[in-house]
Amino acid sequence: MKKVKSHFVSILANCFAKMFHYAVVIAGITLLSGCMESGVLAPRGEIAATELKLLIFSILLMLIVIIPVIIMAFWFARRYRAGGNAAYRPEWTHSTWLEIVWWSIPCAIILTLGTVTWYTTHSLDPYKPLVSDQKPVRIQVVALDWKWLFIYPDYRVAVMNEITIPTGKPIDFELTAAAPMNSFIIPQLGGQIYAMTGMTTALHLIANEPGVYRGFSANYTGKGFAEMQFNVHAVSEEEFAGWIRSAQQSKDVLNWDLFWNELAKPSISDPVKYFGKVDNSLFDDIVMSYMMPNYKPGMMQSHEAAMNVHQPSHQEG
């Protein structure tokens, strides 16, 4: 019987040793990945930096429970191994102070983590505009099969599969889709938001440092999903103004017919393409085309204009 117990303890000890080895390897990979110049562990924006702080805080808080549990697993295996000198107390059933410890600590951790997460989640609401004395740059995003269209409505230009933004200025994204539901994310700037047909969502980000950051689709949408990526160029305000002037030089015009006849068709690995002129209402027309049957471009604007004309005036007194 002692041999069986000894063999069992030996197997258990080997299992724990392997688990510890894998945990060390995973921890090492995680720590080394922090040295990489991409991803959520290398934030370059205010939102991403706050999200990383929350991630690190949550991990450290949970380690308060995890580390003692791992240590006690080894300690119990050694203390109560066959041939050990631990006291044998088969009648022991309860310890008030132990009950207090193993209930109060997890409850305190959950309460702390829940409070911090609730506060941070609301402060990082993707629909909440960023507080800044700088005028935001508006970008309308359309998710397609399998590419991204970015419209700069204030500058009347658009670009396929590439974004250029000024550093230090809030970026107000407005998103929709003309394809299956998708998910838009730029990990180093923070935030992830879905894009859906017939709906608009919002995301507010900011780049604190110049650089080139990777953006991509985070929702599987078919065979071209892996290639649905784009670069975000964060540049100075002067370089951004120059980029806008360069984009406006393009002779390609983006209108309703071109969008549906060419861009909306499924394609993979499309090159970056600039449009020097964009219809003012194109983004709204794309959204409304999934809301109203037989929708034609400009119908929404005409309806709103008619409502304004026929709206009765109210005089005081």
Image: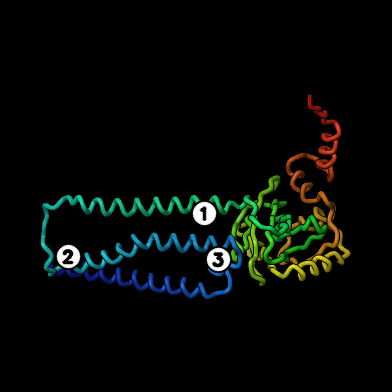
Instruction: Estimate the x, y position of residue 49 in percent, counting from the top left.
Output: 55, 64
**Cα distance in 3D space between marks 1 and 3:** 16 Å
The residue pinned by badge 2 equals 80
Name the mark on residue 40: 3
Determine the residue positioned at 34% across, 69% down. Answer: 19
- N-terminal-most mark, 2 or 3: 3
Label disc, if present, on residue 120 of the rendered structure: 1
Disc 1 marks a residue whose amino acid type is Thr
Percent coordinates x, y for residue 166 in the rendering:
71, 66
Front position among marks 1 and 3: 1
For the residues labelled 1 and 2, the Cα–Cα distance comes to 44 Å
Seen at 74% across and 66% down, the residue is 270
Q: Quadrant of residue 142?
A: bottom right
Three-letter code, disc 3: Val
**Image quadrant for the N terminus?**
bottom left
Mark 1 surroundings: few (<14), some (14-19) or many (≥20) residues within 10 A: some
Residue 302 - label: none
How far, Cα to Cα, is label 2 from label 3? 43 Å
Q: Is residue 280 left or right of residue 38?
A: right
Where disc 3 sits, the SS reads loop
Residue 258's x, y, as percent? 84, 56
